[in-house]
């Protein structure tokens, strides 16, 4: 069965999620000439701990049982910090990343009014995706030889549920 409906991920998904994350972030490591990107340094226990954390919500998309995409968000009051958006390399450019980002806007708790995220300055794909979703740059911070681009979006007040499909 193939479905684009995001499912909540939990601790039992940690192994699959780590594998997906490592595969997806290799392209970012190449783009930034940095193999020590934080998502590439995560251990299985780091991912398990994240999936156990009640303040951190993680969703995934499965295709015939296989985990092919994921995103997570940390809720801090009215702020939702979105991160670790990953799509399996062989499943990219099929709309999964956009679909998950739209799903986050619907699925976050109602108190969240502002969405924050960041990406590397050489992340052409993510920057294009986030701009097309209405995220705007707020500032940049230095990283090892490049900059992190910080982006923000006001959460739409009422996103139709079918927009995430
Ligand atoms: C970024 C990522 C999640 C996008 O997922 P995806 O499913 O391929 O994205 P979508 O198919 O939904 O693409 C939506 C739009 O994003 C932009 N985009 C995505 N990948 C792109 C790329 N490689 N180059 C240029 N634009 C890209 C395009 O505007 C695209 O729309 P289009 O296909 O109609 O032109 C995926 O490439 C990925 O996992 N990358 C590695 C991990 C990563 O960088 N995560 C984000 C860190 S902040």
Image (cartoon, helix red, strand yellow):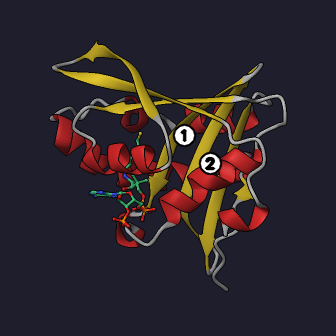
Q: Is residue 133 above or below residue 136?
A: below
Question: Looking at this view, is 15 or 114 the one in front?
Answer: 114
Asked whether residue 148 appears in the rendered view, the answer is yes
Which quadrant of the figure shows ligand 1? Answer: bottom left
Q: CA distance from mark 2 to mark 1?
A: 7 Å
Q: Percent position (x, y) of residue 115?
A: 61, 31
- Residue at screen point 28% across, 42% down: 123
Question: Looking at this view, is 100 or 131 the one in front?
Answer: 131
- Residue at screen point 31% across, 51% down: 125
Circles 2 and 1: CB distance less than 8 Å? Answer: yes
Q: Percent position (x, y) of residue 92?
A: 38, 66
Asked whether residue 15 appears in the rendered view, the answer is no
Question: Looking at this view, is 113 or 97 the one in front?
Answer: 113
Which quadrant holds residue 33?
top left
Tell which residue pokes out farthest to the right in this image.
110
Q: Is mark 1 within 8 Å of ligand 1?
A: no
Tell which residue pokes out farthest to the bottom in this image.
1
Which quadrant holds residue 155?
top right
**Residue linked to disc 1:** 44
**Residue linked to disc 2:** 14
Q: Percent position (x, y) of residue 25?
A: 35, 46
Q: Residue 117 shows which numbered tag? A: none
Secondary structure type for disc 1? helix
Secondary structure type for disc 2? helix
Query: Crowding at label 2, few (<14), some or many (≥20) Cα neighbours within 10 Å?
Result: many
Q: Is residue 144 left or right of residue 53?
A: left
- Residue at screen point 28% across, 29% down: 36
Location of the N terminus (image quadrant): bottom right
Q: Earlier in the sequence, mark 2 or mark 1?
A: 2
């Amino acid at each position: 069965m193939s479905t684009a409906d995001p499912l909540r991920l939990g601790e039992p998904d940690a192994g699959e999620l780590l594998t997906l994350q490592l595969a997806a972030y290799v392209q970012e490591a190449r783009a930034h000439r940095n193999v020590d990107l934080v998502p590439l340094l995560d251990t299985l226990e780091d991912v398990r701990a994240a999936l156990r954390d009640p303040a951190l919500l993680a969703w995934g998309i499965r295709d015939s049982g296989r985990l092919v995409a994921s995103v997570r968000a940390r809720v801090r009051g009215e702020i939702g910090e979105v991160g670790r958006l990953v799509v399996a390399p062989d499943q990219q450019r099929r709309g999964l990343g956009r679909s998950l980002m739209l799903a986050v806007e619907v699925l976050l708790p109602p108190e969240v009014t502002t969405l924050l995220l960041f990406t590397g300055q050489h992340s052409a794909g993510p920057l294009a995706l986030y701009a097309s979703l209405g995220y705007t740059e707020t500032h940049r911070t230095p990283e090892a030889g490049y900059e992190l681009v910080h982006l923000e979006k006001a959460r739409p007040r009422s996103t139709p549920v079918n927009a995430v499909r």
